[in-house]
Amino acid sequence: MTDTHSTTPTPETGQQTEHDEELRYSFPGDKRATAGASISTTTMVRRLPQLIRRSLALAWHADPRSTLLLLLAQAASGVFGAVALYATTGTLTALLRPGPVSEHLHAAAPSLTLLTASAAFRAALGIAVTTLAGRVAPRVNREADLALIEAGCSAELAAYDEPAYNERWEAADRGAATTPDLLTSAQDVIASTVSLAAATGVLATLHPLLLPFLLLGAVPTAVAAVRTARIHYLASITTGDERQALRIYRWYLIDKGRADQVRSDQVLPFILDKYRQAEARIVTVTDRAGRDAARVSLLAALATGAGAALMWGALLYLVSTGRIGLAAAGSATFALRTAVGGVQGMVGNGARLYRMGLYLDDFFAFLDEAGGHRITRGEIVPGPPKTIEVTALTYTYPGEQQDAALRGIDLTLHRGEVVAVIGHNGSGKSTLLKLLSGLYLPQDGGGQITWDGIPVADLDADALFEQVARVPQEFARWPLRAAENVHLGRHDGDPDEEVKAAAALTGFDEIVRKLRSGWRTLLAQGWQGGAELSGGGWQRAAVARALYRTCRQPGLLILDEPTSDLDPRAEHRILHALRALAPDRITLLVTHNLGNAKLADRILVLDQGRIVQTGTWDELASTEGLFHELLDLQRDRTVPAPRTAL
């Protein structure tokens, strides 16, 4: 997402003038508009077989048996359609020959029987196709969603700071949402193709001269379908940033975490006005696209009508000159109607399939690359680190106006050590912790981090994360049962004892005892049977989660303001637990309460991305510097004198 402060030079002075900025999603290197503008009939024809194969591959992966039955039903339906057309010819031939009516009916009986049976079988197969498609489509959608989620979780954490990643995720999500319709359109193209093939075969036997006239009704429709597909796809791309802004405005207004501020700050009219402005910009583009598409469709309809007139004129000419009989002409009429419907179905559904295929390309590109940020690190499996060393570390978040979050950090951490990290908001503390835990990697030319001498980029990512237990500032409040909020599925057999032991270190066990179903209580207020915890209760759960993890796999324990919402008793309990656990792991503690830093063996003081002081609590408290300044401010509890009465 880009929300930077832009300036442009004025024509008169050449100086920079400021402009108000709006919430917009865009990124450099986006080639989808170029791809959309290059859509042509030839391109569509080349792509359709690939898209049909891709659609069927998705369906086969989701439900191979139903997909096979679906294809067989489609093929059988086409066969019975051809049989019905041939039976129509036999029926008309028998009915239109000279002689008594009774003889005509007797002669037409076999053809009528075949025609009736074919119609019945086609109706039954139509029901089967609809049922099978309804079974496969949601499975395809679920498989696509699962694949997209897995790909998204396989991206580096730094991807979320990139506007390009956010946009590619949205594009891929739209592609995943098209997968059920993609299968339906592919199925319709197959059905139309089979129907066209059957009708073409019948027409070829009646008179080959009729075949070229099918193109007269197909070409204008095909060209119009492709052009309207291009118009709508480009409109979708053009309005993509606005539609994303709508989702964000909507989320901020309805999210529970901000619901109180929406009401107390009376922000609804202001945000709704921004929502309407973005929506108006979308409407302007889509209305223009609708008008352009309507003009193209109107011209195509006129051309198609002219082609149809020529086709039926040719049929009348063949009948009037005796080149085909009256019965054959009747059969040709049915076959032509079937063939024209097949052509139009192929073109219309093919164009729709092609347009959806453009979104599907975004989906598959994201699966292949995870938005260009797939985790591709080394294969070395680390154990619990004895030493973590940081050398000349500098890190800058994406953005034209971003200052470096970290500048030239040099640091060595040892197992058994508790290190407190102190600093103003925005001093780089959280960024440093993410880098130390391997969630971010050092940037090219931005220094190095090693675990026991091995660069973190050379370590297997999952194995590295296995060694890390964290309590971030914004910890997750998982909609899971109380016990699951601690172990998160990482347990062998019955987790109760280990979970209870970790929870006892934070006091979370005391909260659980008051819940309706104890450890089995669902912590998801607003859902059926769900319960809610206080802010302090959730923080105890988050710390218990980290302690449970680090007790199972001692390595690196990171706690970013782990007691900010806790009362003094709970805070005291957790700090003593950290001290007791320290010998077997590297422990990092971020806290704004400088008194809590006394438990640390060493304190790092950060300011504007640099380590400006390091030492023990006593050393820093007795030395002039930022720590001493912060300590004096924290101790200062004086307030202005009350106002005296006049």
Image (tube, rainbow, N blue to C red):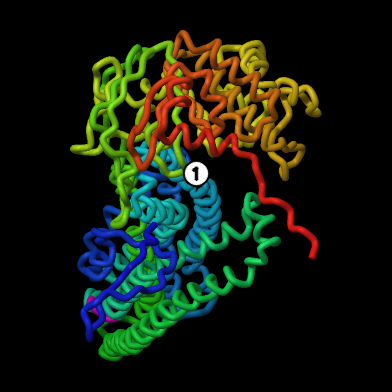
Query: Can residue 235 be seen from the camera position used here?
Result: yes
**Residue 343 in sight here:** no
> Dot 1 surroundings within 10 Å: few (below 14), some, or many (20 or more)?
some
On screen, 218 above or below 547?
below
Is 214 a magenta residue? yes
In the figure, is residue 573 to the left or right of 329?
right
Q: Residue 455 at what x, y percent from top left?
A: 24, 24
Decide: is 408 above or below 352.
above
Residue drawn at x 54%, y 14% is 579
Q: Which residues are magenta?
A: 212-216
Q: Residue 313 location, x and y as percent?
A: 30, 90
Q: Measuring 63% from the left and 36% from the top, which residue is drawn there? A: 479
* Circle 1: element type: helix
Residue at the spot 28% in from the left edge and 27% down from the top edge:
410
| Viewer-side residue, 461 vs 639 | 639
- Quadrant for residue 474, please give it: top right
Q: On the rendered image, what quadrant is the C terminus found in?
A: bottom right
Q: Is residue 431 magenta?
A: no
Q: Position of residue 295 (x, y in %)?
A: 36, 87
Residue on which disc 1 sits: 142
Principal secondary structure, stretch drawn in magenta: helix
In this rendering, the count of numbered labels is 1
Q: Please identify the quadrant where the N terminus is shown.
A: bottom left
> Is residue 588 positioned above or below 117 on the image?
above
Residue 266 or residue 311, whichever sits in front: 266
Amino acid type assigned to the residue bearing label 1 in the image: Arg
Q: Is residue 66 above or below residue 581?
A: below
- Residue furthest to the left in view is 445
Q: Nearer the viewer, residue 287 or 59?
A: 287
